[in-house]
Amino acid sequence: MFKKIITVAALLGAGWVHAFMPQTGTWVVTSELDGKPGRGLAIDVQNDVFVLQMYAYENNGHPTFYLATGRLVDNQVSAPLMRYAGGRHLGSGPLSGQEAGNAGTAQFRFTSGVTGFVTLPGETEKAIARFNFGYPFAAPSLRGIWNFTSFGPLGLTAEVANLTVSGPATNTGNGIVASSDGLFGCEHQTSGNAAGGVLCVRLNAQGQLQRGYLFVYSVNEGEGYLLNASGSMTEQLVSVRRLTTPSTIGTGIVFKEAEQSQPDITLLEQALSDLATQSSLQ
C-alpha cells in the first residue's frame, strides 16, 4: 500500500504529476553526511528558476562558495558553477564580489522533492538529499498544528488538527500524538505496510473511524493519500502542511506564536476579596 506513495505513480489519472519542485532548503551529498564540517548545497526553485549556492573548499583548504542558476526542466537542470571573490567581509565597507572563474558545469536530476543526484565538475554522480536536522523520526516531532487538504474524485476536503497529547506506541509505530479531545491522532510508522510514513486517523464521538491520512513529509510539508471510513486508500491526493512547530511557533510568513491575552479577573478578584473578609476565616 505505502509503495503507492513512494513511487507517486498515476496519482489521479494519466498526466497528473510528471514533475515536482525540489524542496527549498539545505541539501547535502548523502555520502558526505558524517557529522563533520563539509560541503553543503542551498537550493531554491521559484517557478522554473533554479538557484544553487554551494559552500566548499579550494584544493589548498581555504573555504569558498559557488553560485549556479538555470532552468529546471523535467526535474533536471544543468548550469555553470561560478566562483566569486573580492566581496564584502566582516567589518569591511561596501565591496562587490566579482566572478573569479567558471569551475565547470553542475548537473542535477531530482527523483523527488527531497532526493536527487548531482554531478559536479570533475566528479562522478552522487546522491543528494534535503537535510532534515530539526525533526527526527520520533513522536515529539509531530506535535503542533497541521493542515490536511485532499482533492481528487471525491472533491475537495480540508481539516486542521492540533496535536498536543502524547500517547503509547502501537505495534507498528513509535508513539501516538493526539488532539486534546482524543479524536484525531498521528504516528510515525516503523514497521508494516506503512513503514517510513505517518499514519493519522480521525474518529467520531463514538470512536468509529471517519477517515485517515497516510503521508510522507519533510520538515513542514508532506504528501500522501486519504483513507476512507473502511481504512482503504482512495485516490484522493493529500497535501499536508505543518502550521506550527511543536512549541507553537508559526512556520509561515505572517502568523507567529499566539500571544496570550490577559484574562478579565474582575469577578475572581471580587470573590477573593469577599472570601477574605468572611468571619469564618478568623
Image (tube, helix red, strand yellow):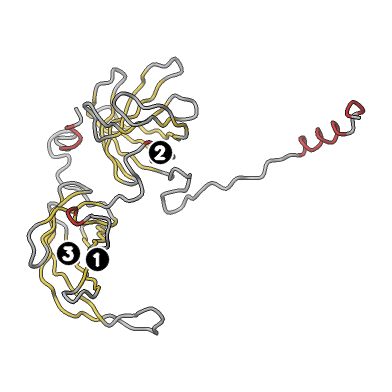
Numbered disc total = 3
Mark with earlier residue (2, 1): 1
Ranked by sequence position, the earlier of labels 3 and 2 is 3
Q: Residue 126: x, y in percent?
A: 12, 56
Q: Which mark is residue 53?
A: 1
Viewer-proximal residue among 280 and 70: 280
Give the percent coordinates (x, y) of residue 2: 20, 30
Image point (47%, 35%), residue name: 164
Mark 2, residue position: 140
Check the picture and name the quadrant holding the C terminus. top right
Residues tagged 2 and 1 counted as in contact (Cβ below 8 A): no
| Earlier-in-chain disc, 1 versus 3 | 1
Q: Amino acid at mark 3?
A: Gly
The quadrant holding residue 109 is bottom left
**Amino acid beneath label 2:** Pro
* Number of residues whose C-alpha sits closer than 10 Å to that of mark 3, classed few (under 14), some (14–19) or many (20 or more): some
Q: Amino acid at mark 1?
A: Gln
Q: Within 10 angstroms of label 2, few (less than 14), some, or many (20 or more) residues?
A: some
Relative vertical location of residue 58 with respect to residue 151 in this rendering, above or below? below
Q: Nearer the viewer, mark 1 or mark 3?
A: 1
Q: Say which element carries label 1.
A: strand
Q: State the residue in front, 203 or 282.
A: 282
Q: Which residue is mark 3?
A: 70
Give the image quarter of residue 135.
top left
Q: Describe residue 187's horizontal placement relative to residue 39 as left or right.
A: right
